[in-house]
Amino acid sequence: MTMIDRRGVLLGGTSLLGAAALPASSRAQTAEPRRGGTLTVGFDDNARTMDPTFSIQFSERQVLFLIYNTLTTIGTDFSIQPELARSWTIENEGKRYVLRLQAGVKFHDGTDFDAAAVKYNFDRRLDERVNSPQRSVLRPVIDNVEVVAPHVVAINLRTPYPSLLADLADRAGLMVSPTAAERLGQDFGRNPVGTGAFTFRQWVQGTSITLERNANYWEQGRPYLDRVVFRTIPNQIIGMQRLIVGEVDYVDSLTPEHIRQVEGRDGIVVQQARVGRWYSLQWQVDKPPFNNPLLRRAIAHALDRDRINTITMGGRGTIANGPVPPGLWWSSPDSVVHNHDPARARQLLAEAGIAPGTEITLAAPSDPLLRQIVQLVSEQLGAVGLRVVLAPVAQSEYYARTVQRAINFTPMAWTQRADPDGLFFILFHSRGFANSTGYNSPDLDAALDAARATTDVEARRRLYARAKEIVVTDLPYVPLYFAAEYAAVSRRIQGWVWTPDQIPRFRYAWRAS
């Protein structure tokens, strides 16, 4: 039996090895927190729901982590730490997790958070009729959830699953009010009720989401802010302009080019992300023309990723030869690399029977960085004889349309998770809910299933190295780089934390006078 207390645990036993050379995710605070005031966040509003059971958009999580609490949480080094679960034991050779819950916690509607509420949340996600995207991840490993005592709950697994604690720090661990969810039904996603530091006030689609301080929050003395407003910005360029004039306090997803606008300004602080997003190109490998592996390899060799990095990131990104950045415990040497080789690309196109001038369509999201990437990709593919047609798509629509498989060939960006299963499974496993490429590799599924069923860290490291090799060989995605990404924030905003999943945590933020 393993007992975990508030010191937390680092999955895999190793920290972010590459993080030492990067700035910390938040500055050390010396002043006493001040109560009151509003934080205004520049927000890419492609949100569809505030019900974590159905959430798939990255932007939604910025809001969800204020309305709700998770059972566990992550630190700035990806360590797993207690939250609504104050401690836990791991029993039955890794197949039973017994969570001891915080007492005295209330949902925003005044109902109790307890073991029965945790069971309801899991049963809801696992119910086939509910159709939660999390079901594909959780159903294969969770057998049942058992109420042991009013504030003790057990999660019984079919097999050991070392990623569970990391899942509980993400959407699967966000606890909704059972009473409100049952009463509101499909309307719950527009009227969310959690246990979090802020309560939901208003959502004007495409304009703003407003949250207000939870006066009955269970962490005594928190939060400090009166409200948090997520104000929609069309893109980061406009977001920076609004930050400079004081209309917003925070903007992220910034490139080196963006931050040049605020360098030297006394009232603005710039932070660099510890782990940059993985930028890539993806396509549907089960449909023409990208079901042809020779075409996929040809495009991989046609791309000059160094040039793309230089132009879009000022050369500060890290070239990616797979989905795993350096410095994580599951990082591994690159065994398969598709170097820039236009001659090889032309040869592969000829072997594939693809004539010069063949037309392919590439989605062009309205985000300036993605638009810049697709322009460069278009030029480089044109240089090897492909004619690229750019298909404009609104930034607010492109991710949802990609997941729905309405878009075939598109740029994409993903953040890392606290455990490798969190990204590998959803993107590359044949059952992954975000597998919009149609990729289905029995060898990869076997490696990922084995990796999520053992607690042996070295065995998992080897399995994820093998999984990376398979993915890079088969190319459901063409890796580009791990971005150099930044956030810019008003110097008055203190106490916020930027975790390596790139979700800013504003629960303990406060506004200096």
Image (cartoon, grey):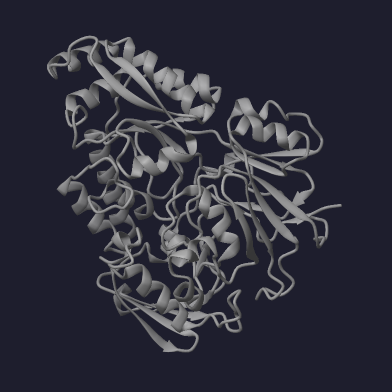
Res 489 seen here: yes
Quarter-of-image position of residue 92: bottom left
Q: Residue at x 70, y 26 (%)?
A: 261
Along the horizontal axis of the image, is 278 left or right of 471? right
In the rendered view, tell whether residue 9 sits above or below residue 48: below
Q: Tell me what residue is drawn at x 24 percent, y 20 percent.
A: 298
Seen from the viewer's position, the closer of residues 177 and 34 is 177
Q: Position of residue 79 (x, y in %)?
A: 51, 59
Position of residue 442 relative to residue 161, above or below, is above
State the residue lying farthest toward the bottom: 149
Query: Image quadrant of residue 20?
Result: top right
Image side of residue 286 versus residue 364, left or right? left
Q: Residue furthest right?
A: 513
In the rendered image, residue 463, in percent from the top left (x then y), is placed at: 26, 51
Q: Is residue 28 visible?
A: no
Of 210 and 133, the residue lying toward us: 210
The percent position of residue 306, horizontal first and vertical second, equals: 44, 20
Residue 168 horizontal side relative to residue 105, left or right: left
Q: Does residue 411 sit above or below 92 in this rendering?
A: above
Q: Please identify the quadrant where the N terminus is shown.
A: bottom left
Q: Is residue 293 left or right of residue 62?
A: left
Relative depth, front residue between 465 and 135: 135
User: Residue 197 falls in which quadrant of the image?
Assistant: bottom right
Q: Position of residue 291 (x, y in %)?
A: 18, 32
- Count of numbered badges drawn on the protein: 0
Tell me what residue is drawn at x 55 percent, y 50 percent: 503
